[in-house]
Image (cartoon, rainbow, N blue to C red):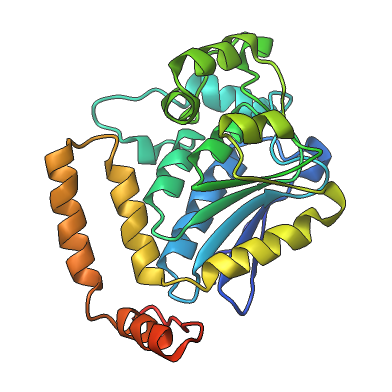
Amino acid sequence: MSQAYKHLLIATTPEGVRTITLNRPEKFNAVNPQLAAELPQAVSEASADEAVRVVVITGAGKGFCAGLDLTDPSTRRAFQEGLTLTRHERLDDLQWVGRWALALTGCDKPVIAAINGPAAGAGFGLTLAADIRLMSEAATLTAGYARIGLSPDAGVTWFLPRLVGVARATELILTARDIRADEAERIGLSSRVFAADSFAESVAAYAAQLAAGPPIALALTKRLLRATTETDLTTQLKMELALIQRGFGTADNLEAIRAFAEKRKPVFTGK
């Protein structure tokens, strides 16, 4: 890795799990302009790294991400003065948490949000943009925006209705109430809930198991799932056919067939 980060910690396991840790624990990992810019860069770097098979995003200390750091004058200036979108600009050009959603959905590797503590506002949006959400039993989620007199950003109004339905998403956003881990799992916002005292170990085991899967197939599957919100059935079927054809005859496909015949676990290489 060539990029150095001020507000992120980066670690990669031999299994290919890249963990990106938001590292402003004294602020519950609240977002300032630099963190807003650093996270998409780190995700893009992980997506391009052939050694990385799974990306895990989590928070340092007791929180996942408390949303915007409105106590930081640079954050307020950025949002009041620096986020004017003209016809000559792209969303990618803005140092803004909306780029987080684009980075995570654009990453070909599976992205896990390991929600170790409270996730609010933009932090909540970050979890929604991930492919899989794993929660500590001590963690909570909240849209939070109404508490500070703001409407949502970070893709919250796009992802949340698709995950839980429009009516429930409306209630969760307008009330800005806390969502405990058990409710999050029940309504589909969390894939799994793990004990707080063994959360890091449980996430590591889950991520390692996912990383042992076939990288090409996982990447193509993610592309298909991403396309479902914008395509009709016929178009989606054509995409499925085109991408499954790409999988046939890959080294991983042949290895899986051999492993099945030999009654052993396949070892995937991403080729």
Work out which residue is located at the far right of the displayed protein and give it. 197
181 relative to 198 in the view: left or right: left
From this viewpoint, is residue 256 visible? Answer: yes
**Placement of 136 over or under 154, stated as above or below:** below
Q: Residue at x 63, y 32 (%)?
A: 186
Residue 241: quadrant of the picture = bottom left
Q: Residue at x 43, y 62 (%)?
A: 47
Q: Residue at x 68, y 11 (%)?
A: 147
Say which quadrant the C terminus sits in: bottom left
**Placement of 11 over or under 156, stated as above or below:** below
From this viewpoint, is residue 6 visible? Answer: no
Residue 259: quadrant of the picture = bottom left
Place of residue 133 in the rendered image (x, y in percent of width and height, measured from the top left) = 59, 45
Place of residue 265 in the rendered image (x, y in percent of width and height, measured from the top left) = 51, 82
Place of residue 104 in the rendered image (x, y in percent of width and height, measured from the top left) = 46, 48
Front residue of 155/36: it is: 155
Q: How many numbered dots are placed on residues in this image? A: 0
Front residue of 103/257: it is: 257
Say which quadrant the N terminus sits in: bottom right
Q: Residue at x 52, y 45 (%)?
A: 37
Place of residue 87 in the rendered image (x, y in percent of width and height, measured from the top left) = 24, 26
Work out which residue is located at the far bottom of the displayed protein and give it. 262
